[in-house]
Amino acid sequence: MIERHPSARWRDTPSSLLILGPDDDVVRLVGPGRQLWLALDAPTTLEAMTVEAGGDAEAVAEFVTELRALGLVVDVPA
Amino acid sequence: MSAVVRAPLIDLEGVLPAVPPVVRAIAAYGLEAPHAPPFPGGAVDDEEWTALWRAVDEQRLWGLTSAALADGVLVVGERRAAEVVAGHEEAVAACLRLDRQLEAVAAGFVAAGVEFRVLKGVAAACCLYDQPGVRLYGDVDLLVRGEDFDRAAGVVVGLGGERHHGEPHVGFVARFGKSAAFSLPGGWEVDLHRTFGLGPFGVAAGSHDLLGAGWPVDLRGFEVEALEPEPMLVGAAFHAVLGGDVRRLLPLRDVAELLRPGRVDPTTVVALAERWGVTAVLAAGVEAATRELGLASDSVLAVWAGEYEPSRRERRWLDDAHDGGPGVERRRVRALLEALPSATDRLAFLRATFWYPGAPSMADRVVRFSRGIGRRAQRSD
């Protein structure tokens, strides 16, 4: 299961979704990335995110790996 | 029905900067505002763009501008749209960083047992706007009780905060002042308030417990509390017509957000303002927001505000709020004394203002009084 990092601060805007990560860098999400972040309102699985993203499991896994590297999501026990 | 129409309770002409009509359209965007200026029929031209850019920046309206662009009601061309988006996103990033400062201060207050409410920017953004990212802010505003003020200030100092201005003696702001501003490391500003505004209305409100029950504010990972909608509207009215930010339309927009149907109970908010002795400020804020943003004037509160007849004292206090004319400092001191609830408070205020340790000689006092001690007494930060 994956969830947003508790110290990630974020805000949605008309043009993008901005996340302030633990290292004070701001990450900008648009399109499917924005949708996936919004879908993380509760802890979720890669499979559920893949469904949300329309079935592209590889792209979702890559996206989550990137968010994890940036410290914006964490793995939690199921 | 009287044929005589009274003057506005607060005249913001000369206080609010002149802005192009499109900026007022942006400030009212998304509201039920039948009297707001319309958006231009076509793309904004070069000349309009320069003035628009400057005003949007000064007015902190990147968010609403971005929303109007995204919805296609404002047309500026691709390159300029990208500039608006960049300006907005930069401002949102600053808000997120401010929220992190707020989180640290809030944790310090909780540890010190200081109850507080968030005011203005972050409270308005998260409680009132459909998309918090469109309401931008540049500092953290917190309200605490007078008896907790110095302890709260100590918490902010403990976090590295540098107080902008001193006070005549310890405890002055906690009892008589409005607020103190602090710079935190990194240049972030925290304003610690014990009442809503400067001057006699702020003093009147400040002699009551303003915090009340809180309104939870979800900051995505931590929670703080804002004022409930009715006291928030009273505070927003102060900010809109008497605050240091009256040069901006955004505080008026906050009032307008609270005037949306179902947000506040008109009877409750008027009764609250009466209890705090600030009915004229509420009426002035509602009237100014209705007028400046072109809101429908038939809502219960807009009608009430339009018909509100201030007492002579209220009229005098309102008139002096933005008056820089001769004698105003003396009138302000007099108004502050009138606003204090008891003779004991008045005596203590005079002592604290004029006879504090290290105070200047009597001769100096006379000179300083005429040069603006009244302003110092009001503004003691």
Image (cartoon, rainbow, N blue to C red):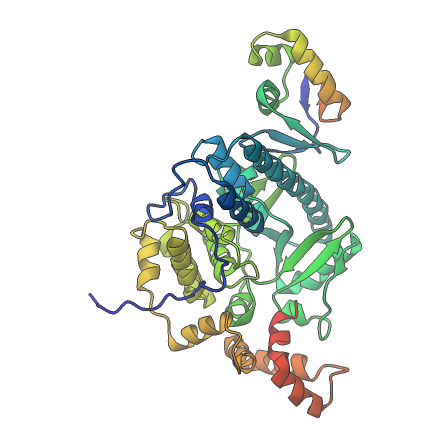
Q: Report if residue A78 is visible in the image.
A: no
Task: State the image coordinates of residue A65 (x, y, percent, origin top left).
Answer: 73, 16
The quadrant of the picture occupied by the N terminus of chain B is bottom left
Quadrant hosting residue B180: bottom right
Task: Name, please, the residue furthest toward the left.
Answer: B1
The quadrant of the picture occupied by the C terminus of chain B is bottom right
**Left or right: where B180 falls relative to B227:** right
Task: Name, please, the residue furthest toward the bottom.
Answer: B363
Q: Is residue B322 above or below residue B349?
A: above
Task: Name, please, the residue furthest toward the front.
Answer: B46
Task: State the image coordinates of residue B73 (x, y, percent, origin top left).
Answer: 42, 35
Task: State the image coordinates of residue A72 (x, y, percent, origin top left).
Answer: 71, 26
Residue lying at 37% horizontally and 56% vertically, measured from the top left:
B291
**Left or right: where B31 falls relative to B139:** left
Q: Report if residue B361 is visible in the image.
A: yes
Q: Is residue B263 above or below residue B274?
A: above
> What is the number of callouts on the image?
0
Q: Is residue B158 above or below residue B173?
A: above
- Residue sitting nearer the eye, B307 or B341: B307
- Residue sitting nearer the eye, A42 or B284: B284
**Left or right: where B292 falls relative to B361:** left
Residue lying at 55% horizontally and 45% vertically, measured from the top left:
B53
- Residue sitting nearer the eye, B273 or B183: B183
**Left or right: where A19 falls relative to B227:** right
Task: State the image coordinates of residue B31 (x, y, percent, origin top left).
Answer: 40, 43
